[in-house]
Amino acid sequence: MHLCKYLYEEGAHLIVTDIHKDSVKQAVDRFGATAVDPADITSVECDIYAPCALGGTINDDTLKTLKAKVVAGCANNQLLETRHGDQLYDMGIVYAPDYVINAGGVINIADELNGYNADRAWSKIGEIYSNLEKIFESSRTEGIATYVAADRLAERRIEQMKNTRSTFLQNGHHALSSRRLRK
C-alpha cells in the first residue's frame, strides 16, 4: 500500500492484485487503481511490474506472459531461479535486483550500530539510485544480466572491505580474524 501511495502521488495509473481482496479494494478506493485477478497480473501491459511481498513471481510460467518493460518491486527473491534473470535480460526487460532496491531497510538498521543518525542513514539510502545506475550501465556495457552486474558490484565491495577492521566483528569476548572471514 505504501508503494501504491507513492506511485499515485507521482501520477501513476495503478493496476493491482493481491490474494487479500480487502487490500485490492483499498487500493481501488484510495488511488483509483484498476483491479485484476492474481493469475492475470503478469499479462497486463504496463511499464513496471512491481511484485511486493511474494517471492518467486518471475518464473517459467510468468515469463511466458510478462508484458512489463521493467521489473522493480519490494518482494524478496523475485526470481524463482537465477536463470530467470538471464531470461529477463534476453527479453529486453530491465530488472532492478530486489536486494539492491530493497537495501534501505538494512542500511537503516546498520546505521543503528553507530548510534542512529537519520540524516546519515538517509544519505546512504540515497546511494541506492546511483548503485542502480552503475548496475544498469555495467549490464549494458558488459552485455550481462542486471543481477550478475549487481553480484559483481557486491563482490568488488566485499573484496575491498576484506582487510578493513571493524568493531562490528567483535562479540565482546574475541574478534573474528580476517583469516577466518576469508573461508
Image (cartoon, grey):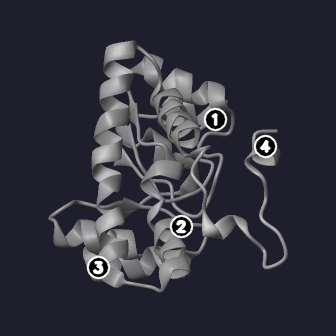
Please indicate, yes or no, whether residue 45 appears anywhere in the rendered image: no
Disc ID at residue 51: none
Instruction: Answer with the quarter of the image where residue 141 lies.
Output: top left
Label 4 and label 3: CA atoms lie apart by 35 Å
Tags 4 and 3 in contact by the CB under 8 Å rule? no
**Front residue of this view, candidates 122 and 78:** 122
Can you give x and y, in whole percent of width and height, for residue 35 in the image?
Answer: 41, 64
Is residue 160 rendered to the left or right of residue 163?
A: left
Disc ID at residue 59: 1
Label 1 and label 3: CA atoms lie apart by 38 Å
Label 2 and label 1: CA atoms lie apart by 26 Å
**Front residue of this view, candidates 9 and 67:** 9
Amino acid at pointer 2: Val
Mark 3: few/some/many CA within 10 Å (<14, 14-19, 20+):
few
Q: Which residue is mark 2?
A: 106
Determine whether the residue tagged by mark 1 lies in a helix, strand or loop. loop
Amino acid at pointer 1: Asn
Disc ID at residue 119: 3
Label 4 and label 1: CA atoms lie apart by 39 Å
Q: Which residue is mark 4?
A: 179
**Front residue of this view, candidates 11 and 137:** 137
Is residue 30 rendered to the left or right of residue 111?
A: left
Amino acid at pointer 3: Asp
Tags 4 and 1 in contact by the CB under 8 Å rule? no
Of the two numbered discs 2 and 4 in the rendering, the one whose residue sits closer to the viewer: 4
Query: Which residue occupies 55% across, 78% down?
Result: 113
Label 3 and label 2: CA atoms lie apart by 15 Å
Determine whether the residue tagged by mark 4 lies in a helix, strand or loop. helix
Instruction: Answer with the quarter of the image where residue 4 lies.
Output: bottom left
Mark 4: few/some/many CA within 10 Å (<14, 14-19, 20+):
few
